[in-house]
Amino acid sequence: MHRFVLPYLWPIITGLLLASVLLLAFPEQLPNPFRQTPPVTVETPPIVDPPPALVPTTSNEPTANRPAPDVRQAAPLTRNQGPASYSNAVNQAAPAVVNIYSSRIVERDQHPLMSDPFFQQFFSGDDATTHQRMLSSLGSGVIVSNDGYVLTNHHVINGADQIQVALRDGRETLAEVIGTDPESDLAVLRIDLEDLPVIELADSEEVAVGDVALAIGNPFGVGQTVTMGIISATGRSHLGLNAYEDFIQTDAAINPGNSGGALVNPDGALVGINTAIFSRSGGSQGIGFAIPANLAHSILDELVTRGRVIRGWLGIEAQALSRELAASFGLRTPQGVIVAGVVSGGPAAQAGLQPGDVLLSIDDQVILDARATMSDIASIPPGTSLPLTIVRGGERMEMTLEVGERPVPTNATSADRQSGS
């Protein structure tokens, strides 16, 4: 029996001896009933009252218990929450937006051989009428009074021999041109129909960037169309579109044929007359411009009551004053404009202004922007006396000028405009 046990006994004894040696060499591995092993826990915030704030220290080390920053809260918006649909605004405004079709007869370019008497003998005199052709264009307009007055763009009806107006309800009629103002690109028509839908005019001074805007017109002649966007900017100028610019910019889609149409607010009131777009393709790229309703209203009143728009005029050609030019004239800041030219017999010439003078202020108002100053002068009644401050030959001078009436320009069209005509 011992012969069978001994082979198993020696490995057990050897293992016990090896374990004893290891425990004597590493006593810290012995179990200690008085030592507490920290439990493994998941970090969760305790549900207790927050501790008091710690006193800030000058250490650069981050602290986890700093107080929340004291931020300023913006006041709530006064405008109402936007509706889910603008159908009420469209129903209010769209009936007053009309389609305008203008046409004129132009001479058709003939083949050079037709000027040769040899070939002319083969054609009768009646064929001379074939050298003329009808040129049509389309646009939009807005009915603004029960008397049948319609606001549109000057470039929509410029040079037209016949103007046809089509209402949303299907009625069509010929329109009479009451007056045009090329420098603001506005025109007033009149139609003789009963029970006309009329749009309400909003105060365009209250228009704010971010307001919802709806553009209504006749793009590409497909029929009355409504597009939506927001007011992207106000007071846009220096665009080279008109002589007097104070545009409302919108990203509502405006395309050829929309010119003269309505830009309305969510209540369906007119805030502007759609006029032009900036585009590389000829279609809408989200940069459209509208003439503010307040300006359109004033032009409407003058064209109806006076037949023309009367603007103040100085009779000078002005050039912007750069910093380098200002230094050459001995000025510390580039304020004012250089008188580059003086119209013979105009108000400036009669007052003694000369080319090369630097115009610093008008009526004690410092000139900071030449175009803005021109718009301010345009609103001054002709005959008003204005004190001027100029610099001539390095010396400051004072003089008085009597404002004249701006003459009607012979050509106010702009090749830079992408419009609906």
Image: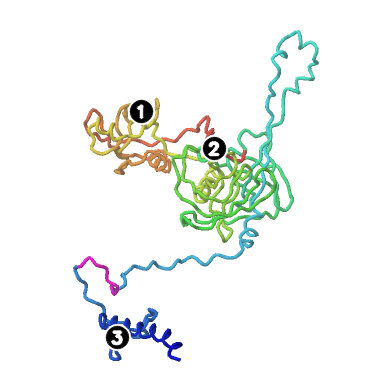
Give the residue number, with chain letter if any, for mark 3: 30
- Is the C-beta separation of discs 3 and 1 under 8 Å? no
Are the residues flagged by discs 2 and 1 in contact, CB closer than 8 Å? no
Q: Position of residue 139 (x, y in %)?
A: 64, 42
Rendering quarter of residue 277: top right
In this orientation, which residue lies closer to the viewer: 403 or 317? Answer: 317
User: Alpha carbon of mark 2 to alpha carbon of mark 1: how far?
Assistant: 27 Å
Residue under label 2, please give it. Answer: 417
Compared with 103, 58 (above or below) is below
Q: At which x and y percent is residue 138?
A: 66, 40
Within 10 Å of disc 3 (Cα), the crowding (few <14, some 14-19, many 20+) is few
Kind of residue at disc 2: Arg
Residue 6 among those drawn in magenta: no
Q: Which numbered marker is on residue 32? A: none
Question: Quick one: which residue is furthest to the left in this view?
Answer: 58
- Seen as rendered, the residue at the extreme top is 118
The amino acid type of the residue labelled 3 equals: Leu
Dot 2: element: loop
Q: Which residue is mark 1?
A: 340
Residue 368: % across, % down:
33, 41
The part of the chain drawn in magenta is: 59-66
* Quadrant of residue 100 within the rendered picture: top right
**x, y percentage for residue 91?**
65, 59
Instruction: Give the structural element (helix, strand or loop) at label 1.
Output: strand
User: Marks 2 and 3, Cα distance to the nearest angstrom?
Assistant: 94 Å
Prevalent SS, magenta region: loop
Residue displayed at 53% across by 41% down: 278
Q: Quadrant of the C terminus?
A: top right
- Indicate left or right for 223 with 46 as reference: right
- Circle 1: residue type: Ala
